[in-house]
Amino acid sequence: MIESVAFPHFDGDKEKEAAGTAVSVPIGGSQEAAMTFCVVLPQPDANVEVEKGVYEGGVQIWEGSRDLVAFMARQRQEGVDWCADKVVMELGCGHGLPALFALQHGAKSCTFQDLNPAVLHNITAPNVALNVPSDASRCRFVSGDWPSLPRLFASEQLDACDVILSAETLYREEGFGDIAAVLKAGLKTGGVALFASKRYYFGVGGGSVLFSQYIASTCGSDLRVDSESVIEDQRSNVREILRIVRT
């Protein structure tokens, strides 16, 4: 379903500070720079237990979101701009940090997709209002599962995308087919998807290695996958950024 979200209104900096918490994303590289977002965090007693098909972790800020923002920021410093004048979607957005980065750097429009309407209402939309309040007209919010998205693209309820962003969504092999179907239906020819993922999700399956193998073996005529960046910082499992091109 298409979910309409009312944007919170903030009258001044003090009210913004009360409503949000600063989250810094180090960019690294030759410059000790960082991106800072103001985000709404859940209450300490909020029920945030992951439950398959019901709640998939949208109120947490996962490290893949930070990895993807840092990657796009470094690429921009090097003259590669993934966002300017692009139609963008973030798949499984949660807090939506990668899509917020895209909006801040000139995206033509941005669709935030999450399984849960409550996440969109209580987390994503307030984050947009806090970080890019003047850009509400460029935003759209979609709640629901991934199998419903190809129909929305086919019926032109959703615009075909130049770029699809996603972080920490490759943790179940059984979801690979649904994700691939979204990429095939939702990306323009030559369009690009950037996925931030752990190489392996121990205990639950999935990961960037298995997803790359899946795309190569089942979608070779429609999608091409390459590894753009590998993150080995000793803080968690090896992570990487995948680039998938719609051929």
Image (cartoon, rainbow, N blue to C red):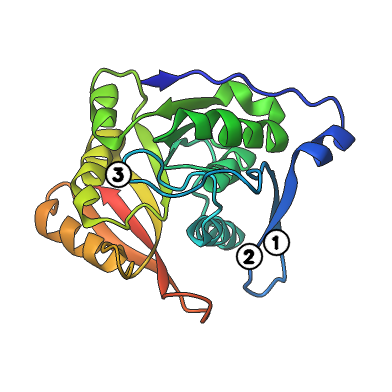
| x then y, percent, for residue 117 | 46, 28
Residue at 66%, 43% in the rendered image: 43
Residue picked out by circle 2:
27
Q: Amino acid at mark 1?
A: Ala
Number of marks: 3
Mark 2 or mark 3, whichever is nearer to me: 2
Mark 1 or mark 3, whichever is nearer to me: 1
Q: Is residue 34 left or right of residue 147?
A: right
Q: Is residue 148 above or below residue 39?
A: above
Secondary structure, mark 3, is strand
Disc marking residue 125: none
Residue at 30%, 44% in the rendered image: 190
Q: Amino acid at mark 3?
A: Gly
Secondary structure, mark 2, is loop
Q: Amino acid at mark 2?
A: Ile
Q: Is residue 63 above or below residue 22?
A: below
Secondary structure, mark 1, is strand
Label 2 neighbour load within 10 Å: few <14, some 14-19, many 20+: many
Q: Is residue 101 above or below residue 128?
A: below
Q: Earlier in the sequence, mark 1 or mark 2?
A: 2
- Does the image show residue 229? no
Disc marking residue 34: 1
Q: Earlier in the sequence, mark 2 or mark 3?
A: 2
Disc marking residue 190: 3
| x then y, percent, for residue 71 | 52, 61
| Of 221 and 98, the residue lying toward us | 98
User: How far apart are the alpha carbons under marks 1 and 3?
Assistant: 30 Å
Label 1 neighbour load within 10 Å: few <14, some 14-19, many 20+: some
User: How far apart are the alpha carbons under marks 1 and 2?
Assistant: 5 Å
Mark 1–mark 2 CB contact (< 8 Å): yes
Instruction: Tell me the quarter of the picture where residue 217 sits.
Output: bottom left
